[in-house]
Amino acid sequence: MKNIKDVAREAGVSAGTVSKVIKGYSSISEATREKVLSAVDRLGYIPNSAASTLSSKGTKKIGIYLNINDKFQQIDEINMLYVMGALDRCRELGVENLIISDESLRSVRYEDYRSYFSSLSIDGIIVFGLNKNDEGMLKMLQDKRFKFAVIDACFIDDNISHITVDQQQAQYDVARQVVEPGDRVLYLAGKENSFIADWRQTGIERLQKEMGFDLKIVRCDFSEAKAFVAAEEFVDEYDCVVCASDLMAIGVRQACKRMGKRVRIAGFDGIRLLGYVSSSIITVKQDFYQFGYRAVDEIMALREGNPGREVLLPYEIAHIHYRSVIK
């Protein structure tokens, strides 16, 4: 196995410089950093700190990457189902894996992501929760040495598969269930940096164009609290509220209950929490477990040389009832 001195000789620098590059020191020039990282790649060097985590030499792993910086405890259910699906499929196939969060990469420079994942013997990465501000992972997607299965962010290439539901159509379909001709419609949109927020908003705008109803769009960032405030401010003026997430729909429902106001409400996601709060909210029910499960299959297919593709999973327009969530 190559050691740090071998990398230093290959790059023409000292072992100390190699160590600083691997640890992400900002005092190293870009030219030197690139020389060292190129030497690391050529030699297949694995730092001792990472090597100790490997259970077998040369075994390639799947990295399960989660962007969890939303800080909303109520959506932990979605992330857990993603991970459970991926872990179960890895176990069935005998594939080693590592879970990595965006928090764990905060101390790693974007330029060093490639070296970081390589040092962990990861050659395939499942990406959950990618947003437009995740510069490091967006750059990683351009690296052809890795295979990617990206959830709910439309990137497709020879080494990238994309797994989602038809977000635009699903938003259109669920809104169609609550919007009536002549309605005034309040739409609570997701985050500005979110790919799925854009697609879902396009769905409601398509329906508005077809039906010609009055539409007001308020960005509430998938936040229950912001949706609650928006409902208090605007709901008296509208006949129904279409929300880009169930959490926002719950916020609207609670605000309406407090105000003694009745409006038709649609959500999106199908989280179990909805069954405990209000079964009157219709939603788009997704199988988040299957997202993770299928993502592992896509990584395996890419490893075998198959090109990347889009995988559209089914969804259901439904009410989430209490009895269904306590089974």
Image (cartoon, helix red, strand yellow):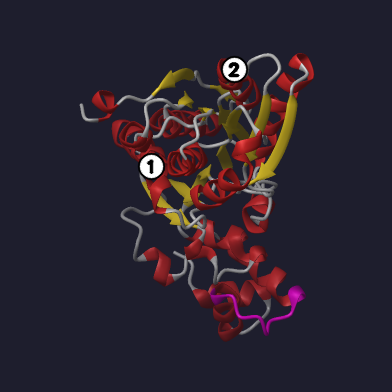
Compared to residue 57, the image places residue 144 above or below, namely above
Is residue 300 magenta-colored?
no
Q: Which residue is mark 2?
A: 173
99 vs 168, nearest the viewer: 168
Quote the CA–CA distance across marks 1 and 2. 28 Å
Residue at x 67%, y 29% (from the top left corner):
185
Q: Amino acid at mark 2?
A: Asp
Residue 59 coordinates in the image, percent (x, y): 40, 48
49 vs 270, nearest the viewer: 270
95 vs 289, nearest the viewer: 289
Q: Earlier in the sequence, mark 1 or mark 2?
A: 1
Q: Amino acid at mark 1?
A: Val
Residue at x 64%, y 32% (from the top left corner):
238
Q: Which residue is mark 1?
A: 83
Residue at x 47%, y 64% (from the top left corner):
104
Residue 246 coordinates in the image, percent (x, y): 48, 36
- The part of the chain drawn in magenta is 23-31
Q: Is the C terminus in the top left, top right, bottom left or bottom right quadrant?
A: top left
Marks 1, 2: nearer the viewer: 2
Residue 293 coordinates in the image, percent (x, y): 40, 31
259 vs 178, nearest the viewer: 259
The answer, for residue 284, to whether it is visible in the render is yes
Please rate how many residues cluster around mark 1, counting C-alpha atoms within 10 Å: few if below 14, some from 14 to 19, many from 20: many
**Outermost residue toward the front?**
260
Is residue 24 magenta-colored?
yes
